[in-house]
């Protein structure tokens, strides 16, 4: 009798879990809804204005960590975001791309003001001093490490290359790996845009 009750309980649990899975959105990228990290940041934008996540409430936010001297990953990712905005058409106004520099030593406000909006005028560059940068990276579990170059000014930075996506309520929902298909990102953004606020 105990075995039968146990079997029924297990069956109900499986049915319940399967039912739950079918009601949520089906994303192409990694669903990290409910993550206990990536709650907020306190940085300065490329115009000199202090910023935090709440400033962008009501928009889907794509948050990427990189640096302007990056030879490949960063410009490729930013170009992908620029293409995404074109594909979204009028809905692009409901999406905000944020570029957080991991290189406060070289990435001045002026340099970020040239680099980030070059991909799209609405993109925002964010920076802080080294402690603020380290604190933000830690909050988002982002790895970064300076690698020496031939001269002191030509170092590179190894870093986590993915993108964090927040919904319109400011909740962390997705992690997008570098190299993910642009069509998958577009589909996921449209899914988030279709959600009720």
Image (spheres, rainbow, N blue to C red):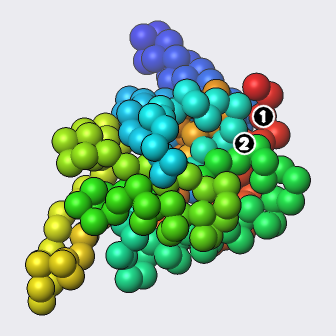
Image quarter (top left, top right, bottom left or bottom right) of the C terminus: top right
Vertical comparison of 122 with 3: above or below: below
Q: Residue at x 70, y 31 (%)?
A: 58
Q: Residue at x 46, y 43 (%)?
A: 48
Q: Residue at x 74, y 62 (%)?
A: 85
The residue labelled by disc 2 is 192
Depth order, front residue of 135/168: 135
Say few, some or many: other residues with alpha carbon within 10 Å of mark 1 (under 14 / 14 to 19 / 20 or more).
few
Which corner quadrant of the image does residue 187 belong to? bottom right
Say few, some or many: other residues with alpha carbon within 10 Å of mark 2 (under 14 / 14 to 19 / 20 or more).
some
Q: Residue at x 51, y 60 (%)?
A: 113
Name the residue at the right extreme: 90
SS for tag 1? loop
Which corner quadrant of the image does residue 120 belong to? bottom right
The residue labelled by disc 1 is 195
Give residue 100's position: percent from left, percent from top: 41, 53
Vertical comparison of 80 with 3: above or below: below
- How many angstroms separate mark 2 from mark 1 (CA)? 5 Å
Depth order, front residue of 39/111: 111
Query: Is residue 138 visible from the viewing direction of this image?
Result: no
Give residue 19's position: percent from left, percent from top: 68, 30
Give residue 159's position: percent from left, percent from top: 29, 64
Give residue 173's position: percent from left, percent from top: 56, 40
Vertical comparison of 106 with 57: above or below: below
């Amino acid at each position: 009798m105990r075995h039968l009750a146990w079997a029924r309980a297990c069956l109900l649990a499986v049915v319940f879990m399967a039912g739950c899975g079918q009601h949520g959105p089906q994303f192409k990228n990694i669903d990290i809804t409910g993550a206990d990290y990536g709650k907020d940041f306190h940085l300065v934008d490329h115009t000199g204005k202090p910023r935090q996540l709440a400033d962008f409430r009501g928009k889907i936010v794509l948050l990427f960590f990189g640096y302007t001297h990056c030879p490949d990953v960063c410009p490729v990712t930013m170009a992908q975001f620029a293409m995404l905005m074109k594909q979204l058409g009028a809905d692009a106004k409901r999406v905000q791309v944020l570029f957080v520099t991991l290189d406060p030593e070289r990435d001045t406000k002026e340099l970020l003001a040239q680099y980030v909006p070059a991909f799209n005028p609405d993109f925002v560059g964010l920076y802080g001093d080294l402690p603020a940068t380290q604190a933000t990276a830690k909050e988002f579990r982002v790895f970064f490490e300076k690698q020496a170059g031939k001269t002191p000014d030509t170092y590179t930075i190894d870093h986590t290359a993915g993108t964090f996506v927040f919904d319109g309520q400011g909740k962390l929902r997705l992690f997008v790996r570098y190299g993910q298909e642009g069509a998958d990102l577009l589909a996921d953004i449209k899914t988030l845009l279709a959600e009720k606020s």
